[in-house]
Amino acid sequence: MRSILKRLGVLATATATIGVAMSCPAASAAEPDLPLYPFSLGSGAANPLAPQMQAGPDIFGNLHAKVVVGVDSTIGNHHDAPPNQTFVAFGFSPAPGKFGYAICSDSVSTGFLRFSCLDVEGDSTTPYARIVLRPFDATVSQAWTVLTPHHETPRVKALRNIGSGLVIDTLNQDAGKSLVQRSYVDRPIGVPNSQAWYVDRVDN
């Protein structure tokens, strides 16, 4: 794996230069934090088979990209997820009284202190706006909170945008289609859920 973790550590010490408050709050039993180690995000959607969150083709100099429905190519061994399905999170405060996580791509993050993180296209607050990757700018559209829909399954998360209040959804679309944001829908355990994401450690 590239040195994204090392660079994130450096970023945490350089916040004074960009005026961003960053921290790693203590985990709670009800809503654990996103991990500090690299992870993949597998979707609970019914379609396609074994869907994954994936950074799409790079555009504009490897710092902007779509976020699309991918397919698990590891035969269930998520520890070996490829870079375009690997993410790292860190906490920050985009505004007074607000806290969220930046979720940054391993494959669309290059150069010193240059990270591309999950964002909403055009900073939109409307349903069905696309999820994209943009260079980290510490705005509310790049800040995500973590919901645990069912505490019996703590590994399963929903990712809610602080700016819009909407969650990331695959809409059960085919591989290669863009992820979008939409209103949260509470679904029972065991039912396919296009808003649910399984957080798995990546070791490569």
Image (cartoon, helix red, strand yellow):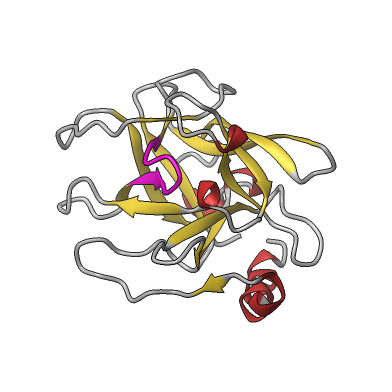
> Is residue 160 highlighted in magenta?
yes
Tell whether 177 sits left or right of 136.
left
Tell whether 106 sits left or right of 48.
right
**Quarter of the view holding residue 2:** bottom right
The quadrant of the picture occupied by the C terminus is: bottom right
Across and down, in percent, residue 59 comes to 79, 35
The residue positioned 39% from the left and 45% from the top of the image is: 159
Q: Is residue 34 above or below residue 11?
A: above
User: Would residue 93 be seen by someone viewing this image from the given angle?
Assistant: yes
The residue closer to the viewer here, 52 or 132, is 132
Q: Which residues are magenta?
A: 158-167
Q: Residue furthest right?
A: 61
Across and down, in percent, residue 79 comes to 50, 55
The residue closer to the viewer here, 110 or 78, is 110
Across and down, in percent, residue 24 comes to 44, 74
The residue closer to the viewer here, 150 or 114, is 114
The residue closer to the viewer here, 18 or 103, is 18
> Is residue 176 highlighted in magenta?
no
Q: Is residue 76 above or below residue 110?
A: above
Across and down, in percent, residue 31 comes to 26, 61
Q: Residue furthest top?
A: 174
The residue positioned 32% from the left and 31% from the top of the image is: 183
- Tally the marks: 0
**Quarter of the view holding residue 167:** top left
The quadrant of the picture occupied by the N terminus is: bottom right
The residue positioned 57% from the left and 46% from the top of the image is: 118
User: Would residue 77 be seen by someone viewing this image from the given angle?
Assistant: no
